[in-house]
Amino acid sequence: MSFPASPLPPGDRSIFVAWLLLCLVSLAVLWSVTEPISGPYEQLDPGVAKGVFVKQVVWVVLGYLGLLAATRVPLRYLDNVAVPLYLFSLALLLLLIVVGPRIGGARRWLPLGPVRLQPSELAKVTFIIMTASVLARSKDSGARLMTMVLSFGVMAVPLVLILREPDLGTSLVFLAVWVGMIFWYGIPGILLLGAGSAAASAVIMFYSESVAQQAWPWGVYILLVLGGLYLVRWSIVAKVLLLALNVATGIGIPFFWDKLKGYQQERILTFFDPSRDAFGSGYQAIQSKVAIGSGGLFGTHYLQGTQKGLAFLPERHTDFIFSVVGEELGFLGTVVLLSLFLVIILRGVNVAAAARQPFTRFLAIGVVTYFVFHVVVNVAITTGLLPVTGLPLPLISYGGSNLLISSVLLGLLLNVSSRTFDD
């Protein structure tokens, strides 16, 4: 593998510029998070060490090198080694469960000298590569169902291993990316409808069982499904299967609920009613909304966020860093930040649509789906639209593993864009 003479990577220049600006935003926000707030306050200690900023600078440099390396990997070679890469990441996940130290009640990091490796982040890359390879090898239209089943298995194995850590937020990334790649592959509309209605059935049953504590919301939903099935011109078999799927997911949600950890259950319940534990599991969501709301249109100005500066906002350098942007830079600052992600997403879709080789098309759309899910879920969590779960904002949140992996994935996207019209 040889690096280009130019320090700039090949491929879509807009994607690289967006990556660079996002990294600079990350450093600026982390500098603010580690700076004491000035003013007539008794508590001036920011509560986050300056070393967080210094380490992020190092990770940005390593991220650039990872991005640059990913742009130079021959994509055909990457397709050929998809299986060993995938198996290696599974081995690390298994090793983590067996010997990984328990930190904060979970096993998520493997210590490697002065740094810690998060195997689930590496698994995101190898999973996308492996799924792209599986989908690209299906040339027979009659084998499409078998290909989708095989790709589901590729997704399910790391998902289950990561749930064992436990890490619900990261495990959902695998499911979301798989759905995005399968949708691009051409999943039949009836299957998408079935999956969507089954998910709705599960959510409504959960609300009926655990929040409203009344059965009628789920009962009304099932009646609406029956009415819709009566109106559509499908076969009896398809109607029965769809109805059975909705009933099964609804009845099964209480069993799934019992399998969740206590803190996970509390986070979900607090999402529906933050006041039930305002100083416990609901504290993060409440303080995050206060921080974003206090920013208004133009923000409280850089370095002057009181929710951040007075340490009211937890995890302000990691999962809730978007709240700091909202507080100090206001609505306009968040719009600019999200616009940079939108550039990556829209340009990535164009790259996937223009790629001629099946493997590169699926690889590109896998990367795009990764960023869509991470950004949408992180922003939804910080604004109170979803329950709190540990999912960083790519390239912005503090954390070496995620920044490096996100940069490598964008490097692969740049790689595809530079070879878009290759035969």
Image (cartoon, rainbow, N blue to C red):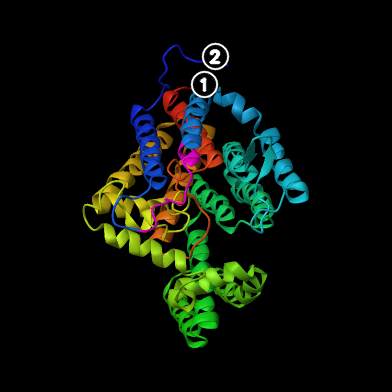
Number of residues whose C-alpha sits closer than 10 Å to that of mark 2, classed few (under 14), some (14–19) or many (20 or more): few
Q: Main secondary structure of the magenta part?
A: loop
Of 221 and 380, nearer the camera is 380
As helix, strand or loop, the secondary structure at mark 2 comes to loop
Region in magenta: 42-53
Residue 376 horizontal/vertical position (percent): 41, 54
Q: Which residue is mark 1?
A: 72
Label 2 sits on what residue type?
Ser
Residue 231 horizontal/vertical position (percent): 41, 76
Of 354 and 78, nearer the camera is 78
Number of residues whose C-alpha sits closer than 10 Å to that of mark 1, classed few (under 14), some (14–19) or many (20 or more): some
Of 226 and 36, nearer the camera is 36
| Residue drawn 60% across the image and 28% down it | 78
- Residue farthest toward the left in the current orientation of the protein: 297
Label 1 sits on what residue type?
Arg
Indicate which disc, 1 or 2, sits on the residue closer to the N terminus.
2
Q: Are marks 1 and 2 in contact (CB under 8 Å)?
A: yes
How many numbered discs, if any?
2
| Residue drawn 33% across the image and 41% down it | 340
Q: Is residue 316 visible?
A: yes
Give the quarter of the figure containing the N terminus.
top right
Was residue 162 drawn as part of the magenta stretch in this picture?
no
As helix, strand or loop, the secondary structure at mark 1 comes to helix
